[in-house]
Amino acid sequence: MPPVQELPSEPTTTLIDALLAEQRSLTAVARFARKHEEHALPAQARFYRDLIPLTKPAPGEQYAFEVDLDQCTGCKGCVTACHSLNGLDDEESWRSVGLLLGGINGEALQQTVTTACHHCADPGCLNGCPVLAYEKDPVTGIVRHLDDQCIGCQYCVMKCPYDVPKYSARLGIVRKCDLCHQRLAVGEAPACVQACPNEAIKVTLTNPSSLMAAYRGAATQENPFLAASPAPDYTLPTTIYKTQRPQVATLRAADETALKPQPAHWPLVFLLVLSQASVGGASGAWLAAAAGQSLAATRLVILSVVLMAVDLGIGALHLGRPAKAWRVFLGWRKSWFSREAIAFGGYFGTACLAATMLVSGRGTGAELNVAMAAVALLGFAAVFCSLMLYVDTRREFWSGFHTGTRFVGSTALLGLAVWLVTISGEPTIPNAALLALIAVALVKLACESTVLRHRHETRWTPLKRTARLMLGQLRIALGLRIALALLGGVVLPGAVITGTLSFSIATAAALLVLLLTGELAERYLFFTAVSPTQMPGGLAT
Amino acid sequence: MNTVVENVPPPNTLLRDFTGPLTQELVQRAGEFGLGNVPDRLKPDAVTSMVCGFCSTGCALNIHLRDGQAVNLTPDANYPVNLGMACPKGWEALTPLAAPNRATTPLLRDAEGKLQPVTWDRAMTEFVSRMKSIQAKHGPESVAWLGTGQIATEELAFLGALAKFGMGVRHGDGNTRQCMATAAVAYKQSFGFDAPPYTYQDFEESDVIVLIGSNLCIAHPIMWQRVLRNRKQPEIIVVDPRKTETAQAATQHYALTPKSDLVLLYGVANLLIQNDWLDNSFITAHTSGFQEFAGHVRQFTPDKVASVTGLTVGQLYRFAESIHRGKAVSFWWTMGVNQGHESTRTAQAIINLALMTGNLGRPGTGANSITGQCNAMGSRLYSNTTNLIGGHDFTNPTQRAKVAAALDFPVACIPTENSWAYDQIMDGIDRGEIKALWLVGTNTAHSWINQNAVPELFKKLELLVVQDMYADTESCAFAHLVLPAAAWGEKEGTFINSERRFGVIKKVSVAPGQALSDFNICRLIANYWGCGEQFREWTSPEAVFQIMKRCSADQPCDITGIKNYRLIDESGGIQWPFPETRIAVCETPSERSGTPESAIRDPRSSGDHRRLFADGRFYHPDGRAKFLFENPRPTPEATDEQYPLQLLTGRGTSAQWHTQTRTRCSPILRKLHPEKLYVELHPADADQLGIEPNEVVCIRSRRGSVTATAFLTATVGRGQVFLPMHYETVNQLTYPAFDSYSRQPSYKHCAVNVERLSGRA
């Protein structure tokens, strides 16, 4: 409420004062009878009684939303009802309404689609959560989020193919639809079910194992869940979309052509690039140690440890609730996030140990070799977990190829660069290393650019959107990324090889800075140009 | 009742937090008062019900109160209009009240041209002295007001009576001219009174529902709810150039060429006549002018109509035959008809179809105009603009005397002529005849057709007063004086919905700062103007309601039987007419017995839903409805080589209201529609123009150019583009054509071109 404006001092006017006073007195309760008896039962019940199951789920069953698409006309009352009846934040609602478009034989078709959490039989959010902040209720099958357990890592946001969990900056956690379990428990319908004027949303009982057969069985051309939505075999969504109109299966998402850069996740950009530089450096240290170059090995390990320490600090920045982040290992059985955290933890600890050994001069050569090998192998494992973390989201741009070539490429490239820095004072110019650097840089750049060929695809696939985004709204970042890669990866080492430039510490440092910045730009594009999997959305401007 | 074991979370452990402050945020508890679970921190201590302040559906909302202040709301399950449902705007009705951009103090433009806060005393002194000096210098004709369909009927009555009978203002109109004037004029000419004949129950009782220029699913979602409650598997026929959400849900959709509706309706009438699919006894007993009408429509042969409308002859036959086969056919229209260059005759062509097939006065029938704003119907009857207060005629001396007596005013204070319509007032400003304009609850600088002309007009004014909830509307930018108005929810009064139902609004929230209700602003002005004595009886909205009752006596809209607000509140709203005797127009004999209160208390009793003309008696002196018709005229701005596309405008989503001054204040509503202007364009047209999906394009008419994101969809026809009206720039393009009877602007058609933005450089 805007503040009350003070009246400047002047003679008060009786009528004005009287009217202002009258305006401030609230009269509805005094002047009108109370609407209901205080303890009256929900008056709305007679409209939703048939829209919720009479019984609790039997063993092997769970609650599920059932949407009659033929009744949904896109009024979006469900979205606001969810917001109001659950007391959510200003912009927050756990339901949204998308649009499918298309046409057969010249006749236009449109279909609005109301959607919320699908309370999947095999939930991606739950499987990805590193701290076990999700539970699938054993009785109701509702996928519940434990708000006080959440550390705000937002990995579930990436893992959910339907873009359901939403991060709240105010709370530092994600929140999501809980199927109004508190209402169902007392025989009331969920907010959206209560609010749909067309009775398009119901809660029904479903058998998750039947979904397994339907969705993970024989591959069909049509999406058996809903047109233009992510393939249901991944998480087994339980929502049932019904329609009498077979044409709906042919429709496309209204927002399939919409190009919207995704959040850059800057802490993750730095975290990934620096951790890969660290592991690359540690690998170099292993080779150096094996070759008996203990000075180089020492420098490399220390550098790797410093990089990783910085990295862990940055990683905490990404979390909404870092105080509880120590629980990050809990999800190791299923979550690549937990596995990555464990692997990097092991890597960092071992690297510290190895660095101590090297600096203090303790340990035999063989022991050192073993320690260095352990550091490098743990580092590789950690980088592998990093890449699996993204591959496991099933976003096409984050496939094994695109993620793998980037992450492994960065590890090699930055490892080489770090190594070059550590030997930059030495008299011999390592031409082979410089040539290797050029080769890695070019191969990586070539692999990265493969995504751009999707720009001409006829259908608006996720990779076409990625390519169009890179060449459109993100073209400055793309140009920068290519320029930096060519400068640091080709021009500068080329100049050293041809003798145009001497290989001083300054040169090596410039090389590292150029390559590091280039990789950060590459990783920025990795996050911003991805096309997230999601339910069909509405118009975008 | 909801202490259920399974909702109690397990205790926290070292590794897992099952509960805590974050979990607590979402805990619910029984809301009591018949509400079901509500968020724990918003549990009310009292609940009251009031009608919504957005559209004319007139849904009732349960306001959850704590210490008398609204904290949340849910739709009222017991109200006969909305049966527990609301659209997104209704759900979010309280949010715009708390917006930071509310007007909280009167603002006066200073010598440097800045709006500065002033006291109400200063504002009133300025208002009165400037208005009076302009009147003295340029004559009483030089002041005008433009009102709204968004404030209470009592406020409209006070505003209209104060302006015309107290201040001697000659010209006043409202934004209802932009949405409802056509329906009002069409009914008045055809039926003898502006009387939408239906009840929403008719949606449920029709076996054929014809929707013309009406995207019910988006514009009136809660009426669509009623269509879906129809258990007769009705034929739903949608006439609309676009494949709207409603067209998608219909059983028949006729995507006619834009603005060929009058030709289509005459063609259908001709087919009905040629096949003798008529209710001859109804025509003979209750109508006049049918033979002339039949002669007129003979020229609209199927071939000719097909070529004009772009439909096939087969479709025309199917349309006509569906009407013929229906036992209860209801015809509904909205802005697609009302906002046209020959809209009154088009609306009457719909009325004619109902008359000739006898589809009037019975359950599930009617020629039914669906209104726009929450109180457009109140404005039509009581704003004292087009009609003398209470649906009377300024030019009729008997009615002037009757109203003067009812008001206890001297008859001499009642003007003997009609005032100018909105467009004529705007022209009057242009010619320099109107020097002072008072805008109440409307945003002309956004909504007026051919918007680019408005700034020049407003600069010609010596005084522009804007009375509004918000101090940052497009119109406030031109104001000399801004009066801060309390909003819906911060004051009392009544609204009249589309089906003639009075509903009560209540005071459930404190107005910000020094904002006053429009009612109280009128009281202040009356006092400062020096006519406080004349308006001594006008002390509260409910006191004015009693005056309105007296004015309504013996009118078709007689409400003398409505005792007070409390009766309306307890009855679930009351439809007019409701005379003291209440014998006039009830549909069944059983309804006529018993006291009005008991007959309507149960929401499901038939008394809750009343329609007009069950006895076939219309309001013309001869008791007959008239067939009215005219030759169709081409659209005023035809497409040509330079401007080859037809621009259609209309409602975008159910989350946006008009110029968005209120709905843009709700973050959740803002999420439900695109942030910026978009244009719907057929993919084949886009191909030809080389336009990519989601590309920003330029749309140009002879009056202006705007940019919008291209949304390619075959739901618009070839050669057509659609722009949602809510975005500020759209009316820079529209062509100022007006229906000659209703003076309603034709927002639905003009010629434009679309091109790539990059191609322009």
Image (cartoon, grey):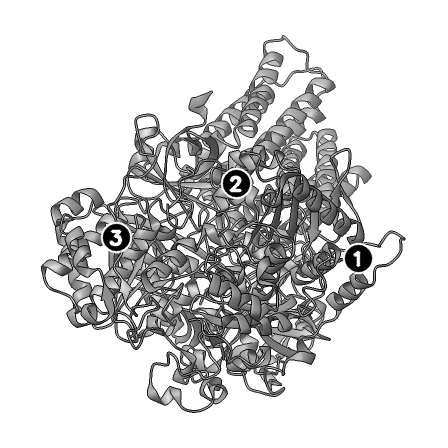
Label 3 Cα crowd, 10 Å radius (few <14 / some 14-19 / many 20+)? many
Discs 1 and 3 lie in a common subunit? no
Residue bearing the label numbered 1 = A4
The answer for how far apart the CA atoms under marks 2 and 3 are is 29 Å
Q: Earlier in the sequence, mark 2 or mark 3?
A: 2
| Amino acid on which disc 2 is placed | Met
Quarter of the figure with residue A7: bottom right
Residue B137, above or below B92: above
**Residue at the extreme left of the image, as rendered:** B275
Determine whether label 1 and label 2 are within 8 Å by CB: no
Residue bearing the label numbered 3 = B629
- Residue B199 appears in the rendering: yes
Specify whether B292 is left or right of A101.
Answer: left
Nearest the viewer among A310 and B471 is B471
| Amino acid on which disc 1 is placed | Val
| Amino acid on which disc 3 is placed | Phe
What's the residue at 30%, 29% (across, down)? B640
Nearest the viewer among A126 and B758 is B758
What's the residue at 52%, 49% (across, down)? A388
Residue B295, above or below B6: above
Front: mark 1 or 2 = 2
Q: Position of residue B226 (x, y in %)?
A: 38, 71
Q: Position of residue A476 (x, y in %)?
A: 56, 27
Instruction: Kindly identify which chain the residue marked by label 2 belongs to.
Output: B
Determine whether label 2 and label 3 are within 8 Å by CB: no
Q: Position of residue A309 (x, y in %)?
A: 74, 43
Residue bearing the label numbered 2 = B426
The answer for how far apart the CA atoms under marks 1 and 2 are is 36 Å
Q: Which mark is residue B108?
A: none
